[in-house]
Image (spheres, rainbow, N blue to C red):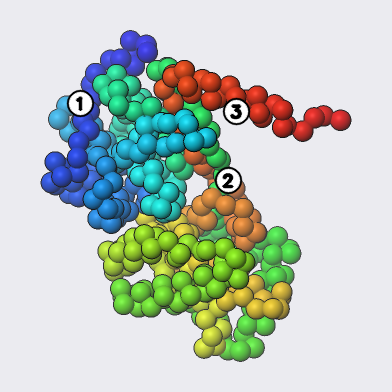
């Protein structure tokens, strides 16, 4: 670590303790949130709901960072022992997750420390250096769904402090820049490819034969709960028809989101919409709203045998048009390769799921064997 980095670290007072020892956590988190540029997944809406729904048996702690007495950083760190290949054990610290598969079904994206915008660049390095020097009770730090810029910075930090960065997964995101649409005249449909425009217009004509296409946004918690019930039914029908469990097969997933809806609909932080053709619902979309960004999170669509009907494409098109009428700047489809994301959006930041690993002999052996396996199974050039 350079002297400059050591000096930056020394300017921070870092602590890690049980949630119960931070009685005013919600107020402190909201105050820091107002001084930060985090995503919805770093907001108290998300984090507070997570804390409220986690079982008491999950060992989750609050990491807090102060600078000259002012709170400038917050995160949740959960401890979990992970076992790979049945014999390799690793004590993990998980950032804003738990390390338990049955609980880590919420898939937060744009995840990171919540940092005062004045300290965004220096705070992650200070935290990781402190964890390496002051806490010996962990082997790996799991960072899930961090954007590619942050991931690169974490790789640089790892190099400085002697950790090994392991990439577990990476995904592309897609988004619609609504400000750019407005600047181009506001006709979103005309900005799409010829084929996408044709599919949307044809599907709309077919749907409108049964009555006008309308989009309704849930205005109350009760209405949102009804929409969510109907979204769940369509979502599960689709995935179960493919012999897959669907998101709602996990009770914690549903419990968390029903609580989130109760907290956030009437404050405007959740956008739950229903699209109908006449009297028939064709789609439900469940989004989060934070600052000027809509995060598209979950959906349920009514699929027909007619391939000309495009319930997902049409529902998202109408939701984007709805957002254009407000001050929303970005409609973010987030990670995934679904065709409707590629058809309606442009590529956004990449996301990475990574682990920063301490330099242990067992992990050097594990990583070496993985590299040998990769070389042996990689396709050979002709």
* Along the viewing direction, whichever of 182 and 33 lies nearer the viewer: 33
Q: Residue at x 24, y 18 (%)?
A: 10
Q: Mark 1, mark 3: which one is toward the viewer? A: 3
Residue 199 x %, y %: 70, 70
Element under disc 1: strand
Which quadrant of the view contains residue 239? bottom right
**Res 300 visible:** no
Which label belongs to residue 172? Answer: 2
Q: With respect to residue 14, does 333 lie above or below?
A: below
Residue 148 x %, y %: 51, 36
Q: With respect to residue 89, does 247 lie above or below?
A: below
Q: CA distance from mark 2 to mark 3?
A: 25 Å
Outermost residue, top direction? 3
Horizontal relation, residue 341 to residue 53: left or right: right
Q: Residues within 10 Å of mark 1 (few under 14, many from 20)?
A: some
Outermost residue, right direction? 382
Image quarter where the C terminus lies is top right
Q: Mark 2, mark 3: which one is toward the viewer? A: 3
Q: Residue at x 45, y 36 (%)?
A: 83
**Res 101 visible:** yes
Question: Which label's residue is closer to the chain start, 2 or 3?
Answer: 2
Residue topped by disc 1:
13
Q: CA distance from mark 1 to mark 3?
A: 39 Å
Horizontal relation, residue 180 to residue 19: left or right: right
Element under disc 3: helix
């Amino acid at each position: 670590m350079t002297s400059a980095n050591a000096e930056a670290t020394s300017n921070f007072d870092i602590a890690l303790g049980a949630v119960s020892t931070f009685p005013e956590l919600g107020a402190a988190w909201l105050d820091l949130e107002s001084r930060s540029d985090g995503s919805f997944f770093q907001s108290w809406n998300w984090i507070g709901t997570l804390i409220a729904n986690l079982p008491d048996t999950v060992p989750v702690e609050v990491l807090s960072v102060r600078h000259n007495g002012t709170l400038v950083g917050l995160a949740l760190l959960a401890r979990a022992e992970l076992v790979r290949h049945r014999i390799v054990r690793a004590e993990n610290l998980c950032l804003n997750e738990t390390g338990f598969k049955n609980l880590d079904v919420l898939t937060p994206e744009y995840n990171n420390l919540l940092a005062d915008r004045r300290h965004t660049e220096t705070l992650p390095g200070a935290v990781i250096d402190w964890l390496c020097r002051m806490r010996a009770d962990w082997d790996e730090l799991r960072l899930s769904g961090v954007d590619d810029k942050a991931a690169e910075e974490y790789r640089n930090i790892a190099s400085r402090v002697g950790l090994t960065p392991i990439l577990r997964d990476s995904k592309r995101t897609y988004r619609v820049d609504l400000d750019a649409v407005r600047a181009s005249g506001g006709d979103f449909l005309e900005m799409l490819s010829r084929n996408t425009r044709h599919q949307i217009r044809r599907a709309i004509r077919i749907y409108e034969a049964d009555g006008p296409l309308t989009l309704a946004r849930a205005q109350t918690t009760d209405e949102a709960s009804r929409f969510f019930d109907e979204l769940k039914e369509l979502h599960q029908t689709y995935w179960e028809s493919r012999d897959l469990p669907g998101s709602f097969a996990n009770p914690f997933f549903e419990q968390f989101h029903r609580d989130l809806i109760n907290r956030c609909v009437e404050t405007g932080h959740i956008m739950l919409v229903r699209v109908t053709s006449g009297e028939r619902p064709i789609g439900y979309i469940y989004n989060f709203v934070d600052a000027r960004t809509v995060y598209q999170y979950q959906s349920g669509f009514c699929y027909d045998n007619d391939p000309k009907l495009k319930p997902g494409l049409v529902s998202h098109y109408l939701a984007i048009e709805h957002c254009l009428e407000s001050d929303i700047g970005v409609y973010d489809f987030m990670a995934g390769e679904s065709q409707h994301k590629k058809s309606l959006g442009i590529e956004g930041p990449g996301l990475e799921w990574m682990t920063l690993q301490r330099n242990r002999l067992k992990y050097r052996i594990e990583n070496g064997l993985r590299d040998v396996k990769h070389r042996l199974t990689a396709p050979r050039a002709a």
